[in-house]
Image (spheres, rainbow, N blue to C red):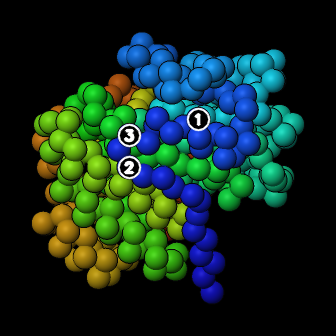
Amino acid sequence: MATITYLTRIEFDEGLAARLPDFCAELGMARPLLVTDAGLTALGMTARIAGCFATAPAIYDGTPANPTEEAVMQALAFYGQLGCDGIVAVGGGSSLDLAKALRLLAVHAPPLARYAAVEGGAAHIKGPLPPMIAVPTTAGTGSEVGRGAVIVMQDGRKLGIVSPLMLPSLAVCDPELTYDLPPQLTAATGMDALAHCLETYMSAAVNPPADAIALDGLLRGTGALRKAVQNGRDKSARWDMMMAAMEGAMAFQKGLGAVHALSHPLGALPGLSLHHGTLNAVLLPAVLRFNREVIGAKWQRMEAILGGAPDARIAELNRDLGLPAGLLAMGVTEAQLPGIAAAAMKDHCHATNPRRAGEGDYLALLKEAF
């Protein structure tokens, strides 16, 4: 038996950010909190979004590169003190995930770990949650249509909180917001989108709509990513990359796998603040090879889209995009690998990898990607 759930409302087109006040009114938001990060504030994006409103919204721009429970609690204090009644999250996956966790704690008692998937937390999540609009400014995580948030908890674990109730009320996907994304970030976030499409498609869970969406996202992403990196104002490439990112997340309702089981604890390593999409790109070739023996004809289907062996083509794409050659180049040490392998066994994505992986397998994958 397959349980298939799709999904939430999506508005997708150039220039839609200007309609955010109308969308807030539709959802009954009179005092939204704009959740974003300091980088977007420095680039003028926060002011651009706030300027769409007749009355400027309250702003929280303290989202860290990997969202933390501490930052969620800071944002929650803003939300309560300012009498907010909804959230407009603007940014990459970090800001969108932090906003989802804030939305949860607006009506649920902390700590966040109580609601983590690995702790059986979905049973504790009750609706309704306050309205939330997700506005991505990168084409990568697809968090705008994802039912989860990945947060570094106070105990140092990077855990996923997953529930259909976590889906944003509305996703506003405006490719214009990605036109000025730097090439390196375009590459890293774009590889995150491709990793979502590939991992979802490989997963053994039964969800044919997710497979079809993942393949369309993979086709769009592989055709557009190099173009978007080379020319950030290529409208067609930016449109296709934002669609590929959204499709990757629509598809991964089916489940992810070993890439994410490893990248989540790697992203929680103290002092490094490793970029999630870059980690996924570096890990992906080794995981593709690991899964090949159990995915059957799916390998040939991916091969047809990528134009060659998937592991080799992804490794080639990483090189072409100037991404790191391995985990060592990102600052990870060999001494840290055993702890990451152990943590991967406890990650919520571990269960949906198509080939069952043990701790030794995860350690071998890390060494292969090192």
- Of all residues, the one furthest to the top in this rendering is 42
Q: Residue at x 12, y 42 (%)?
A: 320
SS of the residue at dot 1?
helix
Find residue 349 and report its image quarter. bottom right
Res 13 label: 2
- Going from the N terminus, do you reach mark 3 or mark 1 first? 3
Residue 360 place in picture, x, y as percent:
46, 54
Tell me which residue sits at (38%, 66%) in the image: 214
Please give the name of the residue rendered at 61% of the width and 27% of the height, measured from the top-left corner.
Answer: 34
At label 3, which amino acid type do we have?
Gly
Q: Mark 3 points at which residue?
A: 15
The answer to whether residue 149 is above or below residue 304 is above
User: Is residue 324 something that shows in the picture?
Assistant: no
From the viewer's perspective, tell me whether residue 15 is left or right of residue 62.
Answer: left
Q: Which residue is drawn at 36% across and 55% down?
A: 243
Disc 1 target residue = 21
Say which of 187 and 363 sits in front: 187
Tag 1: amino acid: Pro
Q: Distance of mark 1 from mark 2, alpha carbons?
A: 16 Å
Q: Seen in the image, is 270 located left or right of residue 151?
A: left
Q: Residues within 10 Å of mark 3 (few under 14, many from 20)?
A: few
Instruction: Specify the farthest residue to the front.
Output: 54
Q: In which quarter of the image is the N terminus?
A: bottom right
